Amino acid sequence: MKRNAFDSIHPIVEIAFFAFTLAMPMLFLHPVMLGISFATSLIWFLMIKGRKSISFLLKFVLPVMVAAAVLNPAFNHRGMTILFYLRYNPITLESVFYGAASAAMFGTVLLWFACFNAIMTSDKIIYLFGRIIPSLSLIISMVFRFVPLFKEQTARIALARRCMGEDVRKGDLMKRVKNGLAILSALISWALENSIITADSMRARGFGLRGRTNFSRYRFDGRDVMIGILLALGMGFVSFGVTSNTISIRYFPRFVMNKFSPLAIACCAVYALTLMIPIIINLKEAAVWRCLKSKI
C-alpha cells in the first residue's frame, strides 16, 4: 500500500469525511453526483492501492455493478416508458435508469469502504468510540484486524498443504472438497486458539477495569481545524442544495431531473472539491516531497 497523506489527519475529521461520502450516494441517487463520487473514490483508491487495485476492481467491484444494472430492470417493472417485453415482463426506461444509478451507487460505496478500511485503522476506531461504546468499538476494531489475518493464514495453510501434495485446485471434485474442508478445519482451530490468546492478553493488560486509561497519539492541530472547516462548509452547501430541491431527481413513475441552474452547478462543483480533499492533500504532499528531494 502506498503512503497516504490523509492518514495523518485527525480521526474525527476522517470519520466525518467518510460519513459524508458514504451517506450521499446511498441517500441521493442523482447521476451527476454519483458520477462525481465514483470518479473521486476511484482516483483515491488507485492512489492508495496502486496496481493491486486493478484485480479488486475487475473481480469484485465491476461484477457487482454489472449485476445491479442487469438485475434491476429484470425484476423492477415500474415506470411508464416501456422499451420491450421479456417473457411478458415489461422492461421500462425508468427501471433501466434506476438500475444504472444503483450500479453506480454500489460501486461507489464499495470503493469508499475500501478507502475507509485503508485509512480508519483499529486504533482510530478505539480512539473515537472507545469511551462511548467500548465493547462495540473493540468488536469493530477486532473485525477489521482479523479479516486480513484470516486471509493471510488461509494462504499459509493452503501453501503448506500444497507442499504436501494436497492442493485444493487439483484432483476430482470430492478430493478438492476434502482438501478445502481440511483448510477450513485448520483455520477454525487457529482462530479459536488465537481468540483464547487474545482474551488472556486483554485480561493481563487490565481490559475492563475501572479507571483504566488509554494511550492516544492524536492531536488536533491547525491543519485539522482548516480541513474540518472546509469539510463542514462543503457538507453544508451540498446539503442545502439537496434539501432545497436545487438538485433533484425522480425515477418513478417517469424519469424527471431538474435543469441545472447556476446554483446547482456550484453545488456539484463544491461537492467535487469536498470529495477531492484527500486527493488534493496527497498531491500537495507529493509535490513537497519532490521539492525536498530535489534540494538534497
Image (tube, rainbow, N blue to C red):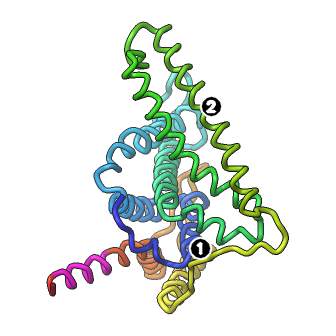
> Which of 148/238 is in front?
148
Most common secondary structure along the magenta stretch: helix
> Furthest residue to the right?
210
Say which label, 1 or 2, has the lower sequence index: 1
x 59%, y 68%: residue: 124
* Relative to 178, residue 153 above or below: below
Residue 120's quadrant in the figure? bottom right
Circles 1 and 2 in contact, beta carbons < 8 Å: no
Q: Which residues are magenta?
A: 283-293
User: SS class of the residue under badge 2?
Assistant: helix
**C-alpha separation, residue under disc 1 versus residue under disc 2:** 36 Å
Q: Is residue 103 visible?
A: yes
Residue 188: assigned label: 2
User: SS class of the residue under badge 1?
Assistant: helix
x 30%, y 76%: residue: 283
Q: Which residue is mark 1?
A: 16
x 49%, y 84%: residue: 227
Give the x, y percent position of residue 174.
Answer: 50, 8
Marks counted in the figure total 2
Crowd band around label 2 with a 10 angstrom C-alpha radius: few (<14), some (14–19), many (20+): few
Q: Amino acid at mark 1?
A: Ala
* Relative to 61, residue 39 above or below: below
Give the x, y percent position of residue 93.
Answer: 48, 43
x 55%, y 67%: residue: 18
Give the x, y percent position of residue 55.
Answer: 34, 43
Residue 29: assigned label: none
**Does the magenta-highlighted stretch encompass residue 175?**
no
> Furthest residue to the front?
204
**Does the magenta-highlighted stretch encompass residue 286?**
yes
* Relative to 74, residue 132 above or below: below
Numbered disc in front, either 1 or 2: 2
